[in-house]
Amino acid sequence: MLAGAALTALVPGTAWAGQTWTAPTVLALPPPTGPYRVGTTAAHLVDTTRRDPLAPDDRPRELMVRLWYPTSTTPRRPDATYLSPALSGLLVEQINAAAGSSLPPDLLTFPTHGRVGAPVAPGAHPLVLFSPALGTNVAFYTALLEDLASHGYLVAAIDHTFDVVVEFPDGRIELPAADVPFDVLLRVRTDDMRFTLDRVSRRFAVGAVSAVGHSMGTMTAIEAIAADRRIHAGVALDGNPLGSAALDRPFLMMGNPTHRRTEDADWAAFYDRLRGPRLHLVVDGMRHYALSDFTLFKSTIDLGSVVELGTIDGLRAETITRAYVRAWLDRYLRGRPSPLLVREPGRFPEVDFQP
């Protein structure tokens, strides 16, 4: 299941000679804004200390983790694709079946801005652990995560096995498990995040650590922060419920207008329990999946009947998300203040600071 539901997508068509002519569908991401080029790789991690409660048989917990990072390699053409041909074909097949469309199987293999296997730039880099929405591959946040890497962050984004379609290096593809209780899935996701932190810290020189999530990934990040003192700061991108944690580390809450304090008791109560530096923002015109790459695709593919994107321009939504996530992480992982966090006037009038 893509994005937690069958993702309906229709290619815009133009009437031509009594038929409907469909133009080729080409997707692309905005370029990263930072000074670094972006390297990327995929890591197959196996937790031999943990049996997988979501698997159909007895096996250790396996994960695929996508890494984005700054690289200072000599210029060469980016060669990382958005998804592999196998994953693109499988997900596009689901789209076509749901929508009655005929999108090409390679729709999601378009080039990104990453260089596969490029060396990591020297030095210790602040780490962003990222957990996606339920049923959503981490690829669908590439625009945000590439941008963080271009500004010197090491990003480790987790495809939670049996939560989403996952492809392993041997070509094996695991599909989501059915009817998993929420508390079980959240516990597994939280353990995935902490295990990923263990493994990434062994492989890379890591500075201060953050946990960032969207939707159910938000709850995953919160639970990981509550359980692990190694995580210095967090970011919640939409999502409900946020849970009962009372965090004492810097935490940014950023969501759509339904999460205003006067409208969402869950978000208000969570904010009141935060004991460290905190900020609660809502963005006018956004809806749930405007905090992902889907917002960038909506001008090419009709996604509105399945995922909530809102009325905000897709590039504008991505620009706002990039700006505030990076400003928060820069402030609390690097000690770099930003006027964005104290109501910078005029630049983003869509952003509403909650009391």
Image (cartoon, rainbow, N blue to C red):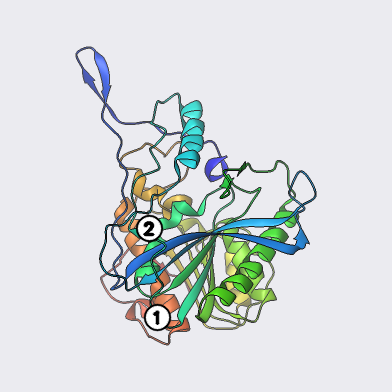
Residue occupying image coordinates x 27% and y 19%: 20
Find residue 330 and report its horizontal and vertical position in percent. Answer: 41, 80
- Viewer-proximal residue, 122 or 104? 122
Q: Quadrant of the N terminus?
A: top right
| Element on which disc 1 rests | loop
- Whether 249 is drawn above or below 42: the answer is below
Within 10 Å of disc 2 (Cα), the crowding (few <14, some 14-19, many 20+) is: many
Kindly tell me whether residue 56 is visible in this rendering: yes
Left/right placement of residue 237 relative to residue 340 reads: right
Does any portion of residue 306 appear in the rendered image?
Answer: no
Quarter-wise, where is residue 217 in the image? bottom right
Q: Quadrant of residue 218?
A: bottom right
- Residue 122 numbered mark, or none: 1
Q: Is residue 68 left or right of residue 64?
A: left
Which residue bears the numbered disc 2?
143
Q: Nearer the viewer, mark 2 or mark 1?
A: 1
Identify the residue shown where x is 60% and y is 75%: 272
Q: Position of residue 117 (x, y in %)?
A: 42, 62
Question: Which element is circle 2 on?
Answer: helix
> Where does residue 47 sit, x and y in percent of width and height?
70, 63
Callout 2 amino acid? Ala
> Farthest residue in the left direction?
17
Note whether 265 is above or below 200 in the view shown: above
